């Protein structure tokens, strides 16, 4: 039925409804004032028009060509009406126009590994914009599940997409794209791979052969989980943020960020490499990093590591190079698996190590270079509590006596010093 037929039908119904009662109703109306119970005629017309304006993906509306089953060549809103099975040498759906919304309707596009390097959804024309792909699943494609092209589509959105067992990546995006509420697993490259200035939100990646999530510069990764990926769980480039994420049991590192990045409120647990690695000028704040088989947190130059918790990491709990601050952290049981590792380790110069609590590590505070400031730290129960080379500035290191029991309103200090910059062994 055409749009004109639908509008005529609704108009006829509206005229019948206004002509007077034609069927019997209740003889006794309900108590109370009469109130509207349905939509206006205009609202119904608008809804019909909106539905009719979408275009079904099929051989008539979106015919394919030599390298695609279906092809979208003009802007518009498109929807899938059933599952799609791939064939050798063809993308499932190829997009060569911008300003396209593709609603997969919960259906699945299924390929197979011997089909060649072809994607479930593929954008093949450069410099397109405003493409949205949502609400569907992809399995077994010969290249990527969804490939918007690193240099092809910009300012796009991928939402509610689930990709399993692609020979390439699960999801690939261009610049300025939002990827949300997606999952990517068992892909032979990375789960989700983005270009610059992208947002990855509420996504899950696991058992991908390289990274779970990898982004270009200036990106943000939030509320994501990366489990059992072969290299890094989450890896970002320059000037990016990683917030409220979890990286667990990845074969490489948990979370790895480039220079000028911020990592906060994240957990990195039981990864084969470092829990968190941060390059120059980065900040790691309020993170929990436990049971990793290398370092807990490894930072380069000019970094800030603050209010983090490390525990039972095989190598150093926290390691910094030059010109960094390490303040207010709690490190417990680190470095005991390998020996000669620190709860906190300082490799270079111009670092400030202040107000940390280190317990039961191999080396409590291990400083390998001169030219650092070390104040107000507390260390207990390590194989060697303090190991500091010559040439550093540090507050007095005081072995605190066991204080008497306290029961009442006052007690004498049991610290053994009034030096405000003192470090304590207790």
Image (spheres, rainbow, N blue to C red):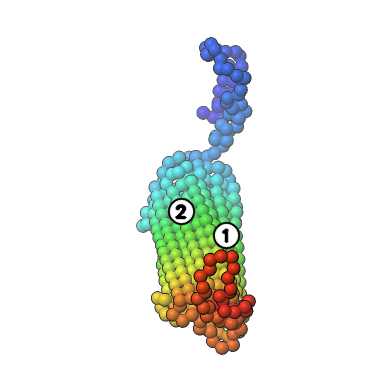
Judging by the rendered image, the residue that carries numbered circle 2 is 183
Q: Residue at x 46, y 53 (%)?
A: 183
Say few, some or many: other residues with alpha carbon within 10 Å of mark 2 (under 14 / 14 to 19 / 20 or more).
Answer: many
Badge 1: few (under 14), some or many (20 or more) residues near its Cα, within 10 Å?
many
Nearest the camera: 238 or 153?
Answer: 238
Q: Residue at x 40, y 52 (%)?
A: 139
CA–CA distance between discs 1 and 2?
A: 17 Å
Where residue 51 sits: x, y (%)? Answer: 54, 35
Question: What mark, if any, has residue 276 been given in the picture?
Answer: none
Mark 2 falls on what kind of element? strand
- Location of residue 395 (image quadrant): bottom right
Q: Position of residue 359 (x, y in %)?
A: 48, 73
- Residue 153 percent across, percent down from the top left: 57, 55
- In the orientation shown, which residue stands out farthest toward the bottom? 390
Mark 1 vs 2: CB contact within 8 A: no
For image coordinates 59% across by 27% down, the residue present is 39
Left or right of residue 175, residue 59 in this image: left
Whether residue 302 appears in this view of the structure is: yes
The residue that mark 1 highlights is: 220
Q: Please report the residue visible at 61 percent of the width from the left and 14 percent of the height from the top.
A: 19
């Amino acid at each position: 039925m055409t749009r004109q037929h639908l509008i005529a039908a609704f108009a006829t119904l509206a005229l019948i409804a206004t002509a007077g009662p034609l069927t019997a109703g209740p003889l006794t109306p309900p108590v109370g004032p009469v109130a509207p119970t349905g939509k206006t005629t205009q609202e119904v017309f608008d809804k019909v028009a909106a539905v009719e304006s979408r275009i079904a993906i099929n051989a008539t509306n979106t015919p394919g060509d030599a390298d695609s089953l279906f092809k979208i060549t003009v802007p518009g809103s498109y929807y899938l009406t059933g599952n799609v099975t791939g064939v050798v040498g063809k993308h499932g759906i190829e997009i060569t126009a911008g300003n396209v919304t593709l609603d997969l309707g919960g259906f699945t596009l299924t390929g197979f590994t011997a089909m060649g390097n072809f994607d479930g959804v593929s954008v093949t024309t450069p410099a397109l914009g405003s493409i949205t792909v949502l609400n569907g699943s992809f399995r077994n494609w010969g290249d990527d599940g969804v490939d918007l092209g690193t240099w092809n589509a910009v300012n796009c959105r991928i939402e509610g997409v689930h990709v399993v067992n692609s020979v390439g990546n699960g999801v690939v995006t261009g610049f300025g794209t939002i990827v949300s509420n997606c999952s990517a697993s068992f892909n032979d490259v990375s789960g989700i791979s983005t270009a610059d200035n992208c947002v990855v939100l509420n996504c899950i990646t696991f058992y991908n052969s390289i990274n779970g999530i990898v982004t270009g510069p200036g990106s943000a990764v939030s509320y994501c989980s990366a489990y059992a990926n072969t290299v890094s769980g989450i890896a970002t480039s320059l000037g990016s943020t990683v917030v409220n994420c979890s990286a667990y049991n990845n074969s490489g590192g948990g979370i790895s960020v480039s220079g000028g990045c911020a990592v906060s409120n994240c957990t990195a647990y039981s990864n084969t490499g470092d829990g968190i690695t941060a390059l120059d000028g980065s900040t790691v704040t309020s993170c929990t990093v436990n049971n990793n088989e290398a370092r807990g947190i490894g930072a380069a130059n000019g970094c800030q590591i603050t209010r983090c918790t490390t525990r039972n990491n095989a190598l150093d709990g926290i390691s910094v190079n030059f010109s960094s601050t390490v303040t207010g952290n709690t490190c417990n049981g680190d470095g005991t698996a390998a020996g000669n590792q620190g709860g906190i380790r300082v490799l270079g110069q111009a670092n400030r190590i202040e107000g940390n609590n280190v317990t039961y590590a191999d080396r409590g505070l291990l400083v390998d270079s001169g030219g650092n400031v070390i104040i107000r730290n507390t260390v207990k129960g390590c194989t060697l509590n303090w190991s500091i080379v010559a040439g550093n500035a540090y507050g007095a290191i005081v072995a605190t006596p066991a204080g008497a029991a306290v029961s009442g309103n006052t007690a004498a200090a049991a610290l053994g010093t009034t030096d405000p910059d003192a470090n304590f062994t207790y």
